[in-house]
Image (cartoon, rainbow, N blue to C red):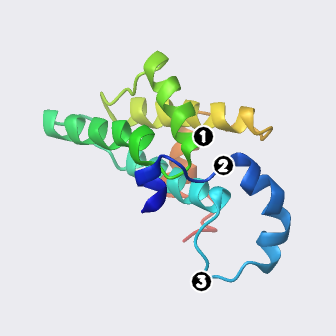
Amino acid sequence: MAAFASGAGFTASQAQTQAAVELETRPANCPPDVEQLGRATWTFLHTTAAYYPEKPTMQHRVNMLSLLRALPVLYPCSNCAQHLGENMKTHPPDVSGRAALSKWLCEQHNEVNERLGKDKFECTVEKLDERWKDGPSDGSCD
């Protein structure tokens, strides 16, 4: 919790310095590094969006906005939190329904991927549902 109190936390340079070595040698009982935290967070957010209602109630919308607006304040990667907060000011979350929220999150994730030199994901509802809700049509995830 000290990272939250001090405003410090993970930094990209910490992760880049040790990422390759840690992936192979890091014991499972260690705290997550910035990459592990990022993957877990994106998985949670995308999956939550995939199951968000098509026609959310006002309470669903309020709750989702609260969750998303808390990330730039509470997220333990200070650089990540800052980038997300800045981006949310210019591209506010769209919580009007499942498809809109899923697409908005995908676009946010793609901005991060672009900044990190990673491939972008296709932000269609079909591709997002395949990845985060239904799995591939070949049944390989059943």
Residue carrying label 2: 11
Residue carrying label 3: 29
Point out the tag, 1 or 2, that comes first from the N-terminus.
2
Find residue 135 and report its image quarter.
bottom right
Q: How crowded is the residue under tag 2: few (<14 C-alpha within 10 Å), some, or many (20+)?
A: some
The total number of labels drawn is 3
Q: Nearer the viewer, mark 1 or mark 3?
A: 1
Q: Nearer the viewer, mark 3 or mark 2?
A: 2
**Residue at the image position 73 percent from the left and 55 percent from the top:** 14
Q: Given contact means CB atoms under 8 Å apart, are the residues at marks 1 and 3 in contact? A: no
Amino acid under disc 3:
Asn
Could you tell me which secondary element the residue under label 2 belongs to?
Answer: loop
Point out the tag, 1 or 3, that comes first from the N-terminus.
3
Quarter of the image containing the N terminus?
A: bottom left
Q: Furthest-front residue in view?
A: 6
Residue 5 image offset from top left, x and y in percent = 40, 53
Q: Furthest-top residue in view?
A: 90
Q: Given contact means CB atoms under 8 Å apart, are the residues at marks 1 and 2 in contact? A: yes
Could you tell me which secondary element the residue under label 1 belongs to?
Answer: helix
Query: Does any portion of residue 136 appear in the rendered image?
Result: no
Residue 114 image offset from top left, x and y in percent = 73, 32
**Residue at the image position 55 percent from the left and 44 percent from the top:** 78
Residue in the foreground of this view, choosing between 64 and 49: 64
Q: CA distance from mark 3 to mark 2?
A: 21 Å
Residue 82 relative to residue 116: left or right: left
Query: Does any portion of residue 7 appear in the rendered image?
Result: yes
Quarter of the image containing the C terminus?
A: bottom right
Amino acid under disc 1:
Asn
